Amino acid sequence: MKRAILILMILLNVLILNNNVEAKEITGEIIAVNAKQDTILLKCTDNSIKEYKVKLNAELSLNNRKVSLLALRPITPDTFQYAKVDLDNSKEIVAIASFYSVVDIKVKEINKNSIILQNLNTDEEVTYTLDSEVELIRNNFKADLSELRVGDKGIAIFGVENRLNKLVLYHYEVSGMLTDIDYQSRSITINIGTRLKPSFKTYTLNKATKIITTAGEIDLDSLMEYSWIKLEIGQDVRTVVARSI
């Protein structure tokens, strides 16, 4: 009898251990929420998309605040919340800890595996990890991280543990010395390098481009009177800021 009880206890312990092994935590983006059926679609870090059932008593939070399942819906059709998801041994969700924050930023420095972003609301500069998991959107189109430029402006989207997940960039800035103007094609050439190591870039201005100086707005014909140029660029050159040095 004692032997049978001992065997039963061993089997129960093995079963409990197996159940604990099967339970796990996963991370990803919540790309859809069905509150009526208590399910979510989760895009995992390996880009696979899976549907999970949310248990009735599951703990749900957004930025460390308790919320309903509806609060975890996508922010926009293509902007999702990042979350840590705890699954039980039946692969149903027992907890979701979602994190989402957006900051207006400017790119200050780009390194091989990191990027320095300036918070435009506080002027604070912070270094973040830059790897293949960071998504770059420029002017509503997905872009490669190699296209990042110092002076880029837009928003940074942060997820779990304040990790940089996405950069949505609208425009960037370049500046340098004005070297030439082609009035017929409305293009200007500036040296964005130095005098010893020049780097010449040509940009075309459209009719909507504003040319601004300390004295006010001017037209292209008067631009040659100025030597230093800063361009604000989106899909095209939006603004030219000119001053004399």
Image: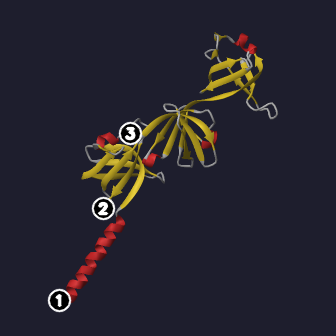
The local crowd at label 2, few if under 14, some if 14 to 19, many if 20 or more residues have their Cα within 10 Å, is few
Residue 222 horizontal side relative to residue 21, left or right: right
Identity of the residue drawn at 60% across and 49% down:
113
Identity of the residue drawn at 27% across and 43% down:
68
Tell me: residue 20, above or below residue 212: below
Residue tagged 1: 1
Within the image, what quadrant is residue 199 found in?
top right
Q: Contact, CB < 8 Å: mark 1 with mark 2?
A: no
Q: Contact, CB < 8 Å: mark 1 with mark 3?
A: no
* Label of residue 90 in the image: 2
Residue 48 horizontal side relative to residue 197, left or right: left
The local crowd at label 3, few if under 14, some if 14 to 19, many if 20 or more residues have their Cα within 10 Å, is some
Residue 228: give x, y in percent of width and height: 72, 22
Q: Amino acid at mark 1?
A: Met
- The residue tagged with tag 1: helix, strand or loop? loop
Tell me: residue 194, above or below residue 161: above
- The residue tagged with tag 3: helix, strand or loop? loop
Q: CA distance from mark 1 to mark 2?
A: 33 Å
Q: Amino acid at mark 2?
A: Ser
Identity of the residue drawn at 39% across and 48% down:
83
Residue tagged 3: 74
Camera-side mark, 1 or 2: 1
Residue 136: give x, y in percent of width and height: 55, 40
Tell me: residue 196, above or below residue 230: below
Identity of the residue drawn at 33% across and 67% down:
20
Q: Contact, CB < 8 Å: mark 3 with mark 2?
A: no
Q: Amino acid at mark 3?
A: Pro
* Mark before the other along the chain sequence, 1 or 3: 1
Q: CA distance from mark 1 to mark 3?
A: 58 Å
The quadrant of the picture occupied by the C terminus is top right
Residue 79: give x, y in percent of width and height: 44, 38
The local crowd at label 1, few if under 14, some if 14 to 19, many if 20 or more residues have their Cα within 10 Å, is few
